[in-house]
Image: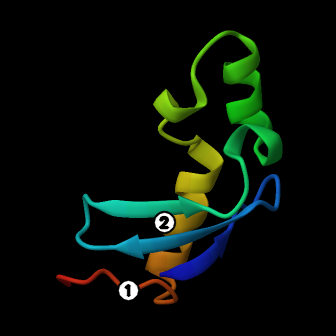
Amino acid sequence: MRPVQCGVCGNQVLCEKFSAAHTQIQWTEEAAAVCPIIAERVAAGELSARVRGCAPLRASIDVEVAGGLLEVADA
């Protein structure tokens, strides 16, 4: 797993790409405490475990993949 930092909030997660469609993300801290987008959804009553992520983090992961810093295992 490789560290990836969100370009919006600066949160760092550990990430691994098994394929173009399969991304594993491991939060290093409580997601709702460090991600304002997830925190907003949790505050609205959603369970943090059911929030699959946020668009800015996804975009940051895509940038890492496009730049060759995060390799896709089956590529």
For the C terminus, give its image quadrant.
bottom left
Q: Quadrant of residue 39?
A: top right
Query: Dot 2: within a 10 Å radius of its alpha carbon, few (fewer than 14), some, or many (20 or more) residues?
Result: some
- Position of residue 41 in the picture relative to residue 66 (left or right): right
Task: Name, please, the residue furthest toward the top.
Answer: 45
Q: Nearer the viewer, mark 2 or mark 1?
A: 1
Q: Is residue 44 above or below residue 4?
A: above
How far is mark 2 from mark 1, CA to CA? 11 Å
Q: Earlier in the sequence, mark 2 or mark 1?
A: 2
Q: Residue at coordinates 53% horizontally, 66% vertically from top-left?
A: 61
- Callout 1 amino acid: Glu
Q: Specify the label residue 16 is tagged with.
A: none
Q: Specify the label residue 62 is tagged with.
A: 2
Q: Position of residue 72 (x, y in %)?
A: 31, 80
- Callout 2 amino acid: Asp
- Position of residue 31 in the picture relative to residue 24 (left or right): right
Q: Specify the label residue 71 is tagged with.
A: 1
Q: Are marks 2 and 1 in contact (CB under 8 Å)?
A: no
Q: Position of residue 15 (x, y in %)?
A: 49, 71
Q: Position of residue 6 (x, y in %)?
A: 71, 61
- Position of residue 15 in the picture relative to residue 13 (left or right): left
Query: Dot 1: within a 10 Å radius of its alpha carbon, few (fewer than 14), some, or many (20 or more) residues?
Result: some
Q: Residue at coordinates 46% horizontally, 83% vertically from top-left?
A: 70
Q: Residue at coordinates 52% horizontally, 89% vertically from top-left?
A: 69
Q: Secondary structure at mark 2?
A: helix
Q: Position of residue 31 (x, y in %)?
A: 68, 45
